[in-house]
Image (cartoon, helix red, strand yellow):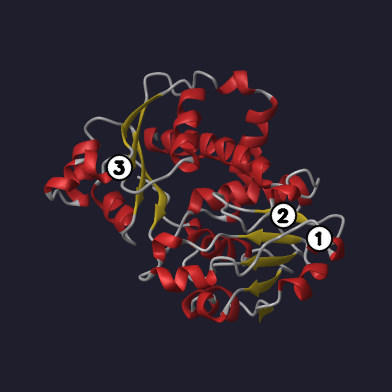
């Protein structure tokens, strides 16, 4: 029984196959509109979400399936003290596939070890967010036509940003990529991410706190918000939250072919004046996420039937 807990659970061939399916869904949605008839997705969200939760639900509905679940921990039996393992066993009795977001790192892995249906990690604490990475990868493929030979700038909260960690893990498997890590000192990329994916594989990277200096060389700029919910004290958050604000003026030095991405929600790290720039890809990125989740649900349910 295959689940998706981190992006490395998928091979490069798997990612290509999912992207091909997503492209076909975009081209011919009617071919896929009934393939999940009679199937149920359990949407188990133990922390707030808009895009990811609704994207999973829209994906299942557009495949002809149904959705059950909850959108906050207080409305689940975890509020009574039920373990993640028991929740996974119970939900397996009701649903054919589970999408779980949880504030504790490793909770979706525990669920996958105890469920009898596939489990998809929809975000666990500061660790992984593999389906956001699938959205990111489809966006990169559609915008840049390749996963290789790119200079990727990651800007903002690189310490707690699970989307950043998963994207580095994915893109480090493709040849010729280079990373520029742009953050305040307090929000630098964790050492384990650098060691496991960059240093271990001999992938070139540089660290800087200067977005303006880095911009001209980037093929992709992946902006992230400083995440208030990950801070232990508000004073640190307030000091760091406006570290980077992308404006049309700053983009004058960037390549015409730059792809600007953001996992959303944004606060004010990208000015709304950037939205009309053709290089702004973040709302296309949202739509790509739905298509990749449709492709992933299809693949995991098909494999579960084998």
- The residue where tag 2 is placed is 260
Looking at the rendered structure, the secondary structure element under dot 2 is strand
Looking at the image, residue 217 sits to the left or right of residue 63; the answer is right
Task: Using the numbered discs, state the Cα–Cα distance from disc 2 to disc 3 in whole angstroms.
Answer: 31 Å
Task: Using the numbered discs, state the Cα–Cα distance from disc 1 to disc 2 in whole angstroms.
Answer: 10 Å
Horizontal and vertical percent for residue 271? 69, 53
Name the residue rendered at 71%, 68% in the picture: 177
Horizontal and vertical percent for residue 224? 58, 60
Horizontal and vertical percent for residue 7? 50, 56
Is residue 14 visible in the rendered structure shown here?
Answer: no
- The residue where tag 1 is placed is 251
Nearer to me, 50 or 234: 234
Above or below, comparing residue 205 to residue 265 in the picture = below
Within 10 Å of disc 1 (Cα), the crowding (few <14, some 14-19, many 20+) is some
* Circle number at residue 113: none
- The residue where tag 3 is placed is 72
Nearer to me, 196 or 255: 255
Name the residue rendered at 63%, 51% in the picture: 137
Looking at the rendered structure, the secondary structure element under dot 3 is loop
Above or below, comparing residue 85 to residue 169 in the picture = above
Looking at the rendered structure, the secondary structure element under dot 1 is helix
Instruction: Give residue 17's quadrant in the image.
Output: top right
Q: Quadrant of the N terminus?
A: top left
Quick one: label 1 or label 2, which is nearer the N terminus?
1
Is residue 220 visible in the rendered structure shown here?
Answer: yes
Marks 3 & 1, CB-CB < 8 Å contact: no
Task: Using the numbered discs, state the Cα–Cα distance from disc 3 to disc 1 in whole angstroms.
Answer: 39 Å
Name the residue rendered at 49%, 80% in the picture: 191
Above or below, comparing residue 257 to residue 158 in the picture = above
Horizontal and vertical percent for residue 19? 63, 42
Instruction: Give residue 228's quadrant in the image.
Output: bottom left
Above or below, comparing residue 111 to residue 60 in the picture = below
């Amino acid at each position: 029984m295959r689940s998706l807990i981190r992006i490395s659970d998928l091979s490069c061939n798997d990612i290509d196959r999912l992207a091909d399916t997503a492209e076909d869904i975009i081209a011919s949605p009617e071919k896929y509109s009934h393939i999940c008839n009679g199937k149920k997705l359990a949407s188990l969200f133990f922390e707030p979400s808009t895009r990811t939760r609704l994207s999973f639900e829209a994906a299942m509905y557009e495949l002809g399936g149904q959705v059950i679940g909850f959108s906050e921990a207080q409305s689940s039996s975890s509020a009574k003290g039920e373990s993640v393992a028991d929740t996974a066993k119970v939900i397996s009795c009701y649903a054919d596939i589970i999408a779980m977001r949880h504030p504790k790192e490793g909770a979706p892995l525990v669920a996958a070890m105890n469920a009898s249906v596939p489990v998809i990690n929809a975000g666990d604490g500061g660790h992984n967010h593999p389906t956001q990475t699938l959205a990111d990868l489809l966006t990169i493929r559609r915008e840049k036509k390749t996963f290789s030979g790119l200079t990727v700038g990651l800007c903002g909260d690189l310490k707690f940003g699970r989307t950043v960690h998963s994207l580095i893990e994915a893109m480090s498997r493709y040849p010729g990529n280079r990373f520029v890590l742009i953050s305040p000192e307090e929000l630098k990329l964790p050492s384990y991410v650098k060691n496991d994916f960059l240093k271990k594989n001999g992938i070139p990277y540089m660290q800087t706190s200067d977005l303006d200096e880095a911009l001209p060389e980037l093929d992709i700029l992946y902006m992230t918000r400083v995440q208030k919910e990950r801070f232990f004290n508000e004073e640190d958050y307030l000091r760091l939250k406006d570290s980077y604000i992308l404006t049309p003026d700053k983009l004058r030095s960037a390549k015409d072919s730059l792809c600007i991405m953001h996992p959303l929600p944004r606060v004010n790290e990208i000015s709304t004046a950037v939205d009309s720039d053709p290089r702004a890809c973040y709302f296309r990125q949202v739509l790509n996420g739905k298509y990749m989740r449709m492709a992933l649900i299809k693949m995991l349910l098909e494999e579960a039937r084998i």
